[in-house]
Image: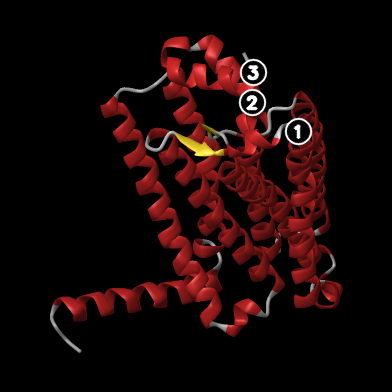
Amino acid sequence: MNASSANETVVLQYRDSFTKAVTKNVIVVVLSISINYINIGLIHTFCKHQIFYTNPRYILFIHLVVNDMIQVTLTIILFVISYTIYKLSVSLCCTFVLLALFTTENTPLNLACMAVECYIAICVPLRHVQICTVRRTLMLIGLIWVTSMLSALPDLFITLATEPLDFFHSRVFCLRQTVFPNPLIIKKRDISYAVFLVIVWLVIFYTYFRILFTAKAANKDAKKARNTILLHGFQLLLCMAAYATPQLKDALQQWFPKNYTDSLFATYIIVQIIPRSISPIIYGIRDNTFRRHLKRYLLCKVSMSKATIHGLP
């Protein structure tokens, strides 16, 4: 039995009842719509005010928001497909999986860059304007995408080199391990995830402690920067859990064989959904400037809704 068949056997063995499947799909769809609705408001606020799209800090933030919207949408689509269409062609599944991988790996890199920007603003304030320019920020975002692509695209190249052409015309249950089944990919994945984990956590710890020891205790901006990096760290901790998901799934299958699908669902919510709901909190709510403009946008939406209800032009 090949890896793809083995994975489909496991899926069939732990298939949910109809009621449970509907409940889970409703939960994830409602959560995704809620997160994306809030993020659309953040993007609209960003685009409407020059103070945001000329500031590297907010450019990095809105890139994170857009990236998270793509990631949430893709993972929700794959989640719903796994309960409805069930199987996809390998070519289409490869496209979905690769985009999901790019956006998933972008998140910790983007958080690390935002932490560095906080560090420069607090510890090297006189050079912040020269170092953190809009042009360099856009180049940094490009570098984030290139890094994620260099990490994930070898999976596709290895599969193209090792699998027959008929494999790409077949239909499979859409998982990373079913469309990229070569054992070398698993080893490469573990190594690349370990490298990402070490580098990003070193950046987070370094920037946090540099701000902690460099800035004055009474400095309000420094305190806020430290709290922001702590939130980045918490968000990063949840995001990095995705790197341990393969091992976690194996452990859950052994520990909770009767409730395996429920454990996987809880893991999916914690690892994929919750981290994407934290981004709006960090800047959309905590940041005074963004909160003020976002509040105006929301109040305007409410006023327009009331006018529509009462039939006003």
x and y percent of residue 24 in the render?
A: 35, 34
In the image, taking residue 111 as reference, residue 17 lies left or right, namely left
Contact between marks 2 and 1 (CB within 8 A): the answer is yes
Classify residue 118 by image quadrant: bottom right
N-term mark: 2 or 3 = 3
Separation of residues labelled 2 and 1 (CA atoms): 10 Å
Q: At 63% across and 78% down in the image, what residue appears? A: 53
x and y percent of residue 195 in the render?
A: 82, 38
Helix, strand or loop for disc 2? helix
In the image, taking residue 21 as reference, residue 294 lies left or right, namely right
Dot 3 surroundings within 10 Å: few (below 14), some, or many (20 or more)?
A: few
Residue that mark 3 sits on = 2
Contact between marks 3 and 1 (CB within 8 A): the answer is no
Residue that mark 1 sits on = 189
Image quarter (top left, top right, bottom left or bottom right) of the N terminus: top right
Helix, strand or loop for disc 3? loop
Viewer-side label of 2, 3: 3
Contact between marks 2 and 3 (CB within 8 A): the answer is no
Q: At 74% across and 44% down in the image, what residue appears? A: 152
Q: At 48% across and 62% down in the image, what residue appears? A: 39
In the image, taking residue 303 as reference, residue 143 lies left or right, namely right
N-term mark: 2 or 1 = 1
N-term mark: 3 or 1 = 3
Residue placed furthest toward the front: 166
Three-letter amino acid code at the position of disc 3: Asn
Three-letter amino acid code at the position of disc 2: Pro
Q: Is 34 in front, or is 297?
A: 34
Q: Is 204 in front, or is 223?
A: 204
Residue that mark 2 sits on = 246
x and y percent of residue 14 in the render?
A: 43, 17
